[in-house]
Amino acid sequence: MPLSMMKKIPGAVAKPIVHPKGILHDVLVRVAGFVFPADFVVLDIEETSDWEPLLLGRPF
């Protein structure tokens, strides 16, 4: 959704827009003895004390 359209919606909360710096494709990840290929999106975001550096799951 374009930002201009979001601003027209009453009660919508504006959040920072983060653009990916790059994508790592087919990185081999070992989980409980199994090896899986995974893709990672690299973001340039500020770290905080309650920040989790890795998000697992599907984004959509």
Image: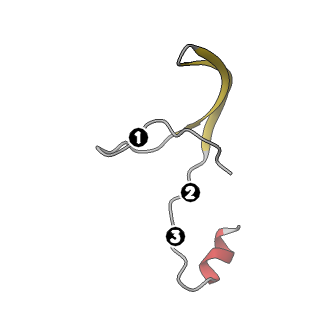
Residue at horizontal 64 percent and vertical 48 percent from the top: 59
Q: Where is residue 11 in the image (x, y as percent from the top left)?
A: 53, 83
| C-alpha distance separating marks 3 and 2 | 9 Å
Question: Does residue 29 lie above or below 14 as drawn?
Answer: above
Query: Looking at the figure, which quarter contains the N terminus?
Result: bottom right
Query: Which residue is denoted by mark 1 in the rendering?
Result: 52
* In the image, farthest residue toward the left: 49
Q: In this view, does 25 lie to the left or right of 17?
A: right
The answer to whether marks 3 and 2 mark residues whose Cβ atoms lie closer than 8 Å is no
Residue situated in front as seen by the camera: 60 or 48: 60
Sequence-earlier tag: 1 or 3: 3
Q: Which of marks 1 and 2 is nearer the N terminus?
A: 2
- Counting every numbered tag in the picture gives 3
As drawn, 38 above or below 55: above
Labels 1 & 3 near each other (Cβ < 8 A): no
Residue type, label 2: Ile
Position of residue 13 in the picture relative to residue 39 (left or right): left
Estimate the x, y position of residue 52 in percent, counting from the top left.
Answer: 41, 40
Query: Would you name the residue on which mark 3 appears?
Result: 14
Q: Tag 3: residue type?
A: Ala
Give the labeled residue for mark 2: 17
The mark closer to the camera, 1 or 3, is: 1
Q: Which of marks 1 and 2 is in front?
A: 1
- Residue at far bottom of view: 10
- Numbered disc 3: secondary structure: loop
Disc 1 from disc 2: Cα separation: 18 Å
Quadrant of the rendered image containing residue 5: bottom right
In space, the residues marked 1 and 3 are separated at their CA atoms by 22 Å
At mark 1, the secondary structure is loop
**Residue 54 x, y percent position in the rendering:** 48, 36
Residue 39 vertical placement versus 36 (above, below): below
Amino acid type of the residue that numbered disc 1 sits on in the rendered structure: Glu
